[in-house]
Image (cartoon, rainbow, N blue to C red):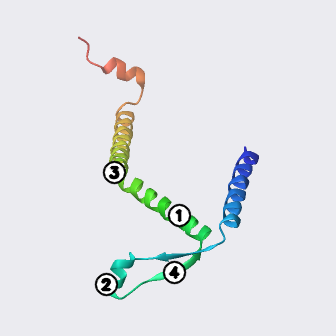
Amino acid sequence: MKAIRYGFWAIIGLCLIFVGIANRDFVTLQAMPTAFADFLSISPTIELPLFVVIMLSVGVGLLIGFFWEWVREHRLRSDGRANAREADQLRKEVDELKKAKASTEGDEILALLDAPTR
């Protein structure tokens, strides 16, 4: 199973290397549209290789997706914590009842004889 996992990650790594080699040209990224930048008299730009832009875009997309899923599952996590607290409370109650019953009953046979009959 480890060989399959390592093979998978090796293929992913090779694909990333090939994407990087094929997209080495520099591109200019602008933070604002040209008309808006001219109106404000500022034009924040940066030049990066295209593969860096691709990898950063994928990384930012993954982070946004992870955060969105984490927020979406908040209700499920809180319900799970509430259920775990209730289960722990019920386990403690059952243990206390078992201890109380064991301390009052010395012997099972005597407990059967002492039980009220109908």
The residue furthest top is 118
The reply to whether callout 1 and callout 4 are in contact (CB within 8 Å) is: no
The quadrant of the picture occupied by the N terminus is top right
Whether residue 31 is situated above or below residue 86 in the rendered picture: below
The disc, 1 or 2, on the residue closer to the chain's N-terminal end is: 2
The residue furthest bottom is 41
Mark 3 element type: helix
The quadrant of the picture occupied by the C terminus is top left
Instruction: Estimate the spatial distance between the alpha carbons at disc 3 and disc 1, rounded to whole Å.
Output: 28 Å
Quadrant of residue 105 in the image?
A: top left
The reply to whether callout 4 and callout 2 are in contact (CB within 8 Å) is: no
Mark 2 element type: helix
The disc, 1 or 4, on the residue closer to the chain's N-terminal end is: 4
The disc, 4 or 2, on the residue closer to the chain's N-terminal end is: 2
Amino acid at pointer 4: Ile
Which x, y percent locates residue 88? 38, 45
The reply to whether callout 3 and callout 4 are in contact (CB within 8 Å) is: no
Which x, y percent locates residue 90? 34, 40
Judged left or right of residue 61, residue 22 is right
Amino acid at pointer 2: Phe
Q: Which residue is mark 1?
A: 59
Q: Which residue is mark 2?
A: 39
Front-most of 67 and 22?
22
Q: Which residue is mark 4?
A: 46
Amino acid at pointer 3: Ser
Q: Nearer the viewer, mark 3 or mark 4?
A: 4
Q: Nearer the viewer, mark 1 or mark 2?
A: 2
Q: Residue at x 74, y 50 (%)?
A: 7
Amino acid at pointer 1: Gly
